[in-house]
């Protein structure tokens, strides 16, 4: 479903020279799989996901979703994806129902199909009690439910979660992770970016550890543990980054994620 090949993104900077956000990034993700991008802030995770979402264009390399090229076929790519982040805005003067309905119409869903999808989603995400609540009166958890509903109302085969649990309390974050797992079980292809080890361990079928725009290691959790002779993911993570920091020249600066 997702193919990323030699993806590079750089920005010119008069003071710092070339700012490299992504460096030769390559990975693939398939249906019924959660592919985790694990890395600290500034690793390049968000840059990669914005390219997949057609918001940014790469400097070089290619990315495709569902067989459609993210640069040359952006409209077709957008119909293949749903995007959820911690910063997804919710309109203060619209109710939960109105917001999800609005996005469904943007995706071109017919009224009967749209309302059928919405009824199912409001039941599945337990949103009946906030159906008529204005965005301005919603808690953070309520807003995140609306963000998920509007991202999947058109039933996209690919879902992108960009640091989606940031700022959520423990209970709301747990509910979101449960929802992500359910979507995977429904056959969705999911890319899940996080800097939280526990989330990656619990959810991801494959993990790419990113730092300074590069993938330092990739595989299932067990493959990573065996390959690096380290059972603790956090320790494995720090060892890889420490080794990379020691061996990396300082001529190129990584951009923020």
Image (cartoon, rainbow, N blue to C red):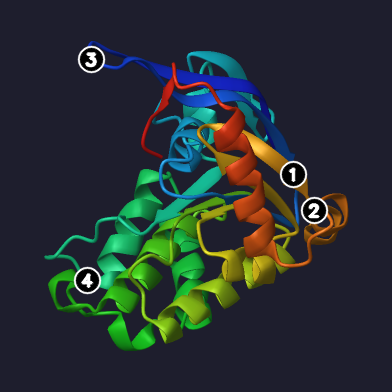
Residue at 36% x, 37% y: name it.
256
Q: Which residue is mark 4?
A: 95
Pointer 3 or 2: first along the chain: 3
The image position of residue 118, as x and y in percent, is 44, 69
Pointer 4 or 2: first along the chain: 4
Query: Residue 228 got which mark?
Result: none
The image position of residue 254, as x and y in percent, is 42, 29
Residue 110 visible from this viewpoint? no
Marks 1 and 2: in contact by CB < 8 Å? Answer: yes
Distance from the alpha carbon under mark 3 to that under mark 2: 38 Å
The image position of residue 238, as x and y in percent, is 60, 53
Q: Which residue is mark 3?
A: 15
Viewed as shown, does residue 32 lie left or right of 8?
A: right
Image quadrant holding the C terminus, namely top left
Please determine whether, in this image, residue 74 is positioned above or below residue 221: above
Question: In the image, which is nearer the foreground, mark 4 or mark 1?
Answer: 1
| Residue closer to the observer: 199 or 141 | 199
| Residue closer to the observer: 71 or 225 | 225
Q: Which residue is mark 1?
A: 218
Question: In the image, which is nearer the foreground, mark 3 or mark 2?
Answer: 3
Pointer 4 or 3: first along the chain: 3
Distance from the alpha carbon under mark 4 to that under mark 3: 46 Å
Q: Residue 132's image quarter? A: bottom left
The image position of residue 156, as x and y in percent, is 57, 50
Marks 2 and 4: in contact by CB < 8 Å? Answer: no
Q: Secondary structure at mark 4?
A: loop
């Amino acid at each position: 479903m997702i193919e990323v090949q030699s993806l590079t993104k750089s920005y010119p900077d008069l003071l710092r020279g070339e700012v490299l956000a992504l460096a030769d990034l390559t990975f693939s993700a398939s249906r019924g799989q959660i592919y985790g991008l694990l890395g600290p802030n500034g690793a390049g995770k968000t840059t990669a996901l914005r390219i997949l979402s057609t918001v940014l264009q790469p400097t070089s390399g290619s990315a495709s979703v569902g067989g459609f090229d993210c640069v040359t076929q952006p409209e077709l790519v957008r119909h293949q994806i749903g995007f959820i982040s911690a910063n997804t805005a919710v309109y203060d003067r619209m109710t939960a129902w109105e917001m999800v309905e609005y996005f469904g119409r943007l995706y071109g869903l017919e009224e009967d199909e749209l309302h059928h999808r919405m009824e199912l989603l409001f039941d599945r995400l337990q949103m009946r009690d906030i159906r008529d609540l204005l965005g301005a009166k919603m808690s953070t958890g309520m807003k995140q439910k609306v963000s998920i509903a509007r991202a999947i109302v058109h039933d996209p085969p690919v879902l992108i979660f960009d640091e989606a649990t940031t700022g959520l309390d423990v209970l709301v974050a747990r509910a979101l992770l449960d929802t992500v797992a359910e979507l995977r079980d429904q056959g969705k292809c999911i890319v899940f970016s996080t800097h939280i080890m526990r989330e990656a361990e619990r959810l991801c079928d494959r993990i790419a550890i990113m730092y300074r725009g590069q993938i330092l290691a990739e595989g299932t959790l067990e493959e990573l543990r065996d390959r690096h002779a380290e059972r603790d993911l956090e320790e494995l993570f720090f060892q890889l980054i420490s080794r990379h920091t020691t061996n990396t020249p300082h001529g190129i600066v990584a951009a923020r994620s």
